[in-house]
Amino acid sequence: MPVIAYREALNQAMTEEMERDDRVFLMGEEVAEYDGAYKVSQGMLAKFGPRRVIDTPISESGFAGIGIGAAMVGLRPIVEFMTFSFSLVAIDQIVNNAANMRYMSGGQFTIPIVFRGSSGMAGALAATHSHRLEAWYAQIPGLTVVLPSTPADAKGLLKSAIRSDDPVVFIENEVLYADKGEVPEGEHLVPIGKADIKRAGSDVTLITYSRSLHATLAAAERLAADEGIEAEVVDLRTIRPLDLETILASVVKTHRAVIVEEDWPYCGIGAGVSDRIYRSVFDELDAPIARVAAKDAPIPYSRALESTMLPSADRVIAAVKEVLYRG
Amino acid sequence: MSQTASAEVKPVVARNQALSWLRQMMLIRRFEERSAMLYQNQKIGGFCHLYSGQEAVAVGSIGVLGEDDYVITAYRDHGHALARGMDPKAAMAELLGKATGCSKGKGGSMHFFDVEKGFLGGHAIVGSHVPLAAGIAFAGKYRNEQRACICYFGDGALNQGCVHEAFNMAALWKLPVIYVIENNLIAMGTQLTRSSAVLDLTIRGGVAYGMPGFSIDGNDVELVARTTREALQRAYAGEGPTFIEMKTYRFRGHSMSDPAKYRTKEELEDAKAQDPIHRFERLLKQRGWLDDATFERFEEEVKHQVEEAIEFAEQSPLPEPAAVYEDVSVASYLPQE
Ligand SMILES: Cc1ncc(C[n+]2csc(CCOP(=O)(O)OP(=O)(O)O)c2C)c(N)n1
Ligand SMILES: [Mg+2]
């Protein structure tokens, strides 16, 4: 199987879907002539031309709306946000128009659109450029929210997202773009709404997604080597709809859970997932659920401070020891 | 710099078409009057913005569109929907929150939709649908179809950022869209003079983006039609968007809950002297195209049609409780509860 980078996997997904369906096109800032701010769309202008790979002015609200309008009448746009931090100025379009249109029209309109782009704490970009907005979007009925953690998932999930008839918020992670991994060629589809067990184990369930998967897996390996603790790592991949079945099956097996995320702790995915676990299988738990999340403060510039915000393997290990009552 | 479409006396359309426009305007007026009564009787809930006084804008402009063209508007949408041929029964049922409504009772007054008629809403966040119109037009151009999108919004909406983003891209990419600003001189309770630094709106909406900008009397249904037809031809010819300011006046408050204390009786009476329905009635009579008997027949017909719509709406079932979860997504929906 070829080994390619996360960004190339995304590029393959878009390229293949554009080859098979003329209704699919890519629009956003710097996606065409500049080859993408993060080079995700590299070479696509040369391949598809300016009709289908479209540079926009810096007007997120405007071009998000243009994408939604085009989707209302049958096109299948991919709208790239340079980063999801900038989707804040387009959030009205995403929430009120993309997510609500089908419902408000009594099912007369579908919005087959993908909003995609990078996200997360990319390194010394400070508060405005380091947002993780997945919980905001995941709260909205009508949206699907996907966050791939590996190149294979990036490709397979993006292809599924482009084929979805519903609006998908597809959140990549800036730090993962250069990560390499095996990616199947051609028709590789990863289903939306299905979590993936990235490591099997029986002592504790670690629930995570996107970039945090990697710190979590590192923690799991160290726990196995140093402490003989076998952690099961569940990569959510889709956070709306949540694959509760996979989460609960694991928790029922291990009786302990730690939720690891790069987002803030309050009202976020970790809060939502722990609520679902408590209400579903409270009696199965041998310890309160532990959570590892960003500190509840704006994201600081200095790397010395920023690094303390991220879920590190050390923080995950400490949380695992807490739920296993091991000092 | 505004261009005023040349005023000519020549009829824009043949007699039958003109009469059907008059009748449509009368239907909208009657529909709104009855909606007001139903609102007062609490049969209609929420926000309900009536179109009375502005009928010539929707009827004259939609009247010249082709079947394949698209229509999109803001929350003051009953008039545009009816002008586009929405069944008054489906419209009234929507106002009453019934399952037979044009949006299955999920949208209400502000969110009418009719995919069959190319009526793409009913949008209640001020300005938010203006980019959608550019996208709808974009799709037509992308597929190389001869299709335009007409988009209505208010003078207040011209102050919203995404509107200007959309104007710029529509002009930059020469999208087949017709932007119609229904300048009724007020946004809720804020007069244009208190919201716009520049009062010639064709400067803000047209000139600023290199779009042709027209400023016309929106209460003259034939002038509305003629100006829209020019814009439509530009759109079809691939020449891009047009901005048309249609000056008009709303006879009622902003919504049903607004007593409109910000204006004088005289101002309202002056405006009513320019009632677009009566102006058109007079014109058609002068031309010898309309007599009193026909006018009275129209009055009876639209009354009957609206009563029938109310009857239908009253008799229609409410949505089933399970409908709450229907039409959220195309994929089978999993509520996150
Ligand atoms: C973003 C947003 N802000 C405020 C409102 C509340 N609001 C609804 S209509 C309106 C006035 C709009 O006036 P105008 O665009 O002139 O249209 P008109 O009502 O005159 O048809 C306001 C402030 C809203 N719906 N959306
Ligand atoms: Mg107004």
Image (cartoon, rainbow, N blue to C red):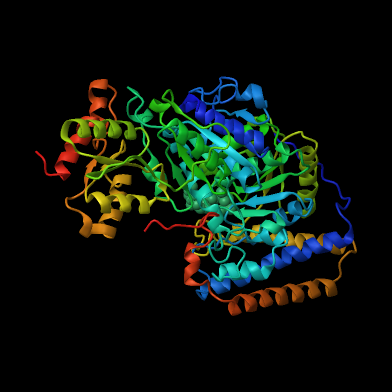
Residue B37 drawn above or below residue A10: below
Relative height, residue B98 to residue B148 (above, below): below
Residue depicted at x 56% and y 74%: B38
Q: Count all numbered tags in the image, as a single digit.
A: 0
Q: Is residue A46 visible?
A: yes
Closer to us: A316 or B162: A316
Q: Residue A77, how many percent across, how many down?
A: 60, 39
Q: In this view, does A275 lie to the left or right of A86?
A: left
Q: Quadrant of residue B330?
A: bottom right
Give the x, y percent position of residue B255.
53, 61
Left or right side of B129 for B286: right
Q: Examine the rendering and report whether any part of residue A265 can be seen.
A: no
Query: Residue B286 versus residue A36: which sits nearer the camera?
Result: A36
Q: In this view, does A262 lie to the left or right of B239?
A: left
Q: In which quarter of the image is the C terminus of chain A?
A: top left
Which quadrant holds residue A123? top left
**Looking at the picture, how far across and down is residue A320, in whole percent?**
19, 40
Going by the picture, which residue comes out furthest to the top? A34
Give the image location of residue A39, x and y in percent.
Answer: 51, 22
The answer to whether residue B193 is above or below residue B19 is: above
Rendered position, B264 above or below B156: below
Q: Pick out the residue farthest to the left.
A: A327
Residue placed at 28% from the left, 34% from the top?
A: A216
